C-alpha cells in the first residue's frame, strides 16, 4: 500500500484534532469551534451519529448536525470531520462537504460495515481516519485500512483510542501501545493520531497520555472538547474546555526523533548496541531454560507426573516477582513475563508428553 498523509505536518509539529464528543446544538458546536479556531487546530471533530453501548442514552442529533459543521467551516475556516458507520452516513456527509471522515472502533471491528463504507466512498477521494478496533487485533485494524485503500482512497490516517478490557484499569480503554507501534513500524508513512480522550475516559490523565503519545513519536492528538464538559450529553467525564485543551497542547514537550549532533549519535549507538547484546543474552538464556524444561518434561513423562504443579508455579511467581522488585521491575511486568515463559515451558512439555521421540531428547 502506498498510503499518503492527510495532514502533512512538518516534523515535530503534532496534528491537532479537537471538538466535542457529540454535536448537541448549533450553539454548542459553534461555541466550541470558536474557542478552538483561535488555537489553529488542524481539524474540528463532532459526532453526529453516536454508537452508544446501551440504548436509551443520547444517540446523536443526526443529519441536522452536518449543517452545523458547515457553519463551522463558513465561520471559522476550520476543516471538519465526523464519524460514519454506514452507507447513508457517508452519502450525507459527502453531500454536506465534510472534509474528512472517521470510522469508529465499533465499525473497524466489523468487516461488513467497513466494506459497506469502502464501497460508498469509492470515487470520492475523501480522506479517511480509521480508529483501532475495540479488541486488540492488529490484523483487523490492518484489514480495515486495506479495505478503505482498495476503494481508491490513498489519504488514510489511523487513530489509536485504546482497547476494551476486562477487570480494573485506570484507563477506560487500555492503550496497549505495542499495537499502534507495530502499525507504525510496518507503515512508517502512516499518520498515527492518539485519541487520549477515549483511552483515558477521565480528565486528570489526558496530559500524561498525550505526552506519552508524543514521546512515542505519534503524529498527533484527537481530544474531545466541550464548552461545558460536566454537562456534556455524552462522555462528560473525559471532555475538557477549549481553554484547558490549549494548556494541554502548550504543556506538551515535543522531542525530536533524530539529531545531527555527532557525539549524541555515537552515544546513542553505543547504548543501543549494549541493548542488542543484552537482548541476545536474554534470548540465549531463555533457550537454555527451555532445554531444561524439556528435560523435566521427559522426566515427568517417564514417571507419569502431570505437567503443572500449582505450588511450584506459585513459588516461582512469588520469588521472582520479589527479585524483580529489587532490580526495579514492576510486579505487572514480572508477572506478564513469567507467565509467558511458563506458558512456553508448558507448551514444550505438552509436546514432549504427547509425541516426542524419547531417544532424541535423552541425548
Ligand atoms: C468518538 O470518537 O466519539 C467515539 C465514539 O469513539 P470510539 O469509536 O473510539 O469509541
Ligand atoms: Mn466520545
Image (spheres, rainbow, N blue to C red):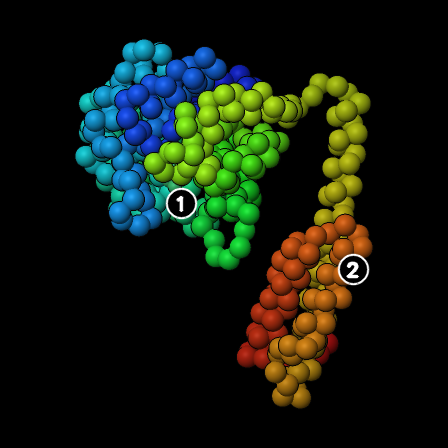
Residue 54 visible in image: yes
The residue carrying mark 2 has its beta carbon less than 8 Å from ligand 1: no
Figure quadrant of residue 19: top left
Could you tell me which quadrant the C terminus lies in? Answer: bottom right
The percent position of residue 237, horizontal first and vertical second, equals: 45, 39
- The CA span between labels 1 and 2 is 37 Å
Give whichever of 346, 65 is nearer the camera.
65
Could you tell me which quadrant the N terminus lies in? Answer: top left
Q: Which mark is residue 56?
A: none
* Secondary structure state at the residue bearing disc 1: loop
How many numbered marks appear? 2
Residue 131 visible in image: no
Proximity of marks 1 and 2: CB atoms separated by less than 8 Å:
no
The percent position of residue 326, horizontal first and vertical second, equals: 80, 55
Instruction: From the viewer's perspective, tell me whether residue 247 is left or right of residue 201.
Output: right
Relative to residue 200, is residue 9 depicted above or below?
above
Which numbered disc, 1 or 2, marks the residue that appears first in the sequence?
1
Instruction: From the viewer's perspective, tell me whether residue 7 is left or right of residue 266.
Output: left
Figure quadrant of residue 217: top right
Give whichever of 193, 146 is nearer the camera.
193
Pointer 2: residues within 10 angstroms few (<14), some, or many (20+)? some
The percent position of residue 21, horizontal first and vertical second, equals: 37, 33
- Residue that carries the numbered disc 2 in the rendered image: 323
Q: Residue at x 29, y 44 (%)?
A: 57
Q: Which mark is residue 133?
A: 1
Amino acid at each position: 500500500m502506498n498510503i499518503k498523509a492527510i495532514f502533512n505536518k512538518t516534523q515535530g509539529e503534532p496534528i491537532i484534532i479537537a471538538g466535542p464528543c457529540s454535536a448537541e446544538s448549533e450553539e454548542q458546536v459553534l461555541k466550541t469551534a470558536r474557542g478552538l479556531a483561535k488555537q489553529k487546530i488542524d481539524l474540528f471533530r463532532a459526532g453526529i451519529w453516536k454508537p452508544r453501548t446501551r440504548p436509551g442514552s443520547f444517540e446523536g442529533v443526526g443529519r441536522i448536525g452536518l449543517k452545523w459543521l458547515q457553519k463551522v467551516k463558513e465561520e471559522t475556516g476550520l476543516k471538519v470531520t465526523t464519524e460514519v458507520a454506514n452507507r447513508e452516513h457517508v452519502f450525507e456527509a459527502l453531500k454536506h462537504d465534510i472534509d474528512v471522515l472517521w470510522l469508529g472502533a465499533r465499525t473497524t471491528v466489523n468487516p461488513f460495515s467497513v466494506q459497506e463504507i469502502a464501497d460508498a466512498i469509492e470515487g470520492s477521494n475523501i480522506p479517511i481516519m480509521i480508529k483501532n478496533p475495540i479488541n486488540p487485533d492488529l490484523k483487523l485494524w490492518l484489514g480495515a485500512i486495506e479495505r478503505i485503500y482498495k476503494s481508491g482512497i490513498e489519504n488514510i490516517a489511523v487513530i489509536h483510542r485504546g482497547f476494551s478490557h476486562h477487570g480494573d484499569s485506570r484507563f477506560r480503554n487500555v492503550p496497549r501501545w505495542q499495537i499502534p507501534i507495530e502499525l507504525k513500524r510496518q507503515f512508517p508513512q502512516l499518520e498515527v493520531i492518539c485519541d487520549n480522550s477515549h483511552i483515558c475516559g477521565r480528565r486528570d490523565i489526558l496530559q500524561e497520555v498525550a505526552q506519552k503519545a508524543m514521546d512515542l513519536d505519534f503524529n498527533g492528538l484527537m481530544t474531545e472538547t466541550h464548552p461545558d464538559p460536566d454537562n456534556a450529553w455524552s462522555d462528560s467525564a473525559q471532555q475538557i474546555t477549549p481553554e484547558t485543551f490549549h494548556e494541554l497542547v502548550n504543556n506538551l514537550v515535543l522531542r525530536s526523533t533524530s539529531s545531527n549532533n555527532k557525539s549524541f549519535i555515537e552515544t546513542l549507538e553505543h547504548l543501543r548496541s549494549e541493548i542488542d547484546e543484552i537482548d541476545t543474552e536474554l534470548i540465549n538464556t531463555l533457550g537454555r531454560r527451555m532445554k531444561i524444561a524439556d528435560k523435566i518434561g521427559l522426566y515427568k513423562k517417564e514417571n507419569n507426573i502431570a505437567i503443572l504443579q500449582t505450588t511450584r508455579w506459585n513459588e516461582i511467581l512469588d520469588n521472582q516477582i520479589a527479585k524483580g522488585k529489587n532490580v526495579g521491575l514492576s510486579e505487572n511486568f514480572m508477572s506478564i513475563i513469567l507467565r509467558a515463559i511458563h506458558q512456553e515451558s508448558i507448551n514444550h512439555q505438552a509436546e514432549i508428553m504427547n509425541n516426542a521421540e524419547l531417544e532424541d531428547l535423552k541425548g
